[in-house]
Image (spheres, rainbow, N blue to C red):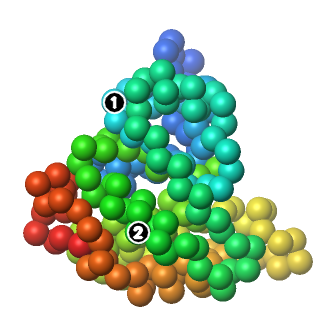
Amino acid sequence: MALLDSLVAQEGSEGALYPPINFSMILPGVYRSGHPHKANFDFLDSLHLRSIMYLSPDVYRHDTHSWAQERGLKMFHLPIEVSKDPTVEVDEALVKEALENILDSRNLPILMHDNKGRHVPSILSALLRLATDWTLEAAYGEYRVFLPPEDDWVREKPGKSKKEKERVADLQLIARFPLDSLKYDPHHAPTWLGAAGA
């Protein structure tokens, strides 16, 4: 929370900065969130982004697309679709492409986002944690941070625990993803990748 504490002004302060929904720093220069809105642009400007990555088959919203273009950001649009069936995995090739773009320091700082900042950024965040030598359980913990609140889930199953809200296909992909298949230039790898390597 130190990053947010230092960037977000106190309520009622002039020039308050507002992060996008479900915003978090994953690693130095790697941020995740839901889709940014106009109210978030000043906050995002304070991050000095070089790139923005939209992880959705939806068309980029005009205001966000224009904001990114005006700032000369490199834009990655990876149409990763999340099935309503929790046993269907997201496209592994697109996940690999997203990770390889993040592993190029010339693209950092980068904001990766989908519409709500939940499943796809959570999968990538967990895989980045594994690439930096976190345990699988700790990476699963990272995946679970932004799961939807209980009232966003099906009403006929009240009281579902957070663990029951996971998509089993996401957890399976995280556990079996071939990190050693990632291709990146070691000369342009982020310093946090260090000796861990993917």
Front in this rendered view, residue 30 or 52: 52
Q: Is residue 154 left or right of residue 112?
A: right
Kind of element beneath mark 2? helix
Q: Taking the image as drawn, is residue 163 in sight?
A: no
- What's the amino acid at mark 1? His
User: x%, y% of residue 32?
Assistant: 46, 50
* Quadrant holding the C terminus: bottom left
Q: Which residue is mark 1?
A: 48
Q: In this picture, is 13 found above or below 109?
A: above
Q: Dot 1 lies on which element? A: loop
At a point 41% along the width and 63% down the height, the residue shown is: 97
The residue that disc 2 covers is 96
Residue at coordinates 65% horizontally, 82% vertically from top-left? 88
Residue at 13% in and 60% down: 186
Question: Which three-letter amino acid code belongs to the residue tagged 2?
Answer: Lys
Q: Quadrant of residue 82?
A: bottom right
* Viewer-side label of 1, 2: 2
Q: Earlier in the sequence, mark 1 or mark 2?
A: 1
Place of residue 79 in the rendered image (x, y in percent of width and height, measured from the top left): 59, 58
> Would residue 116 appear left or right of 133 to someone viewing this image?
right
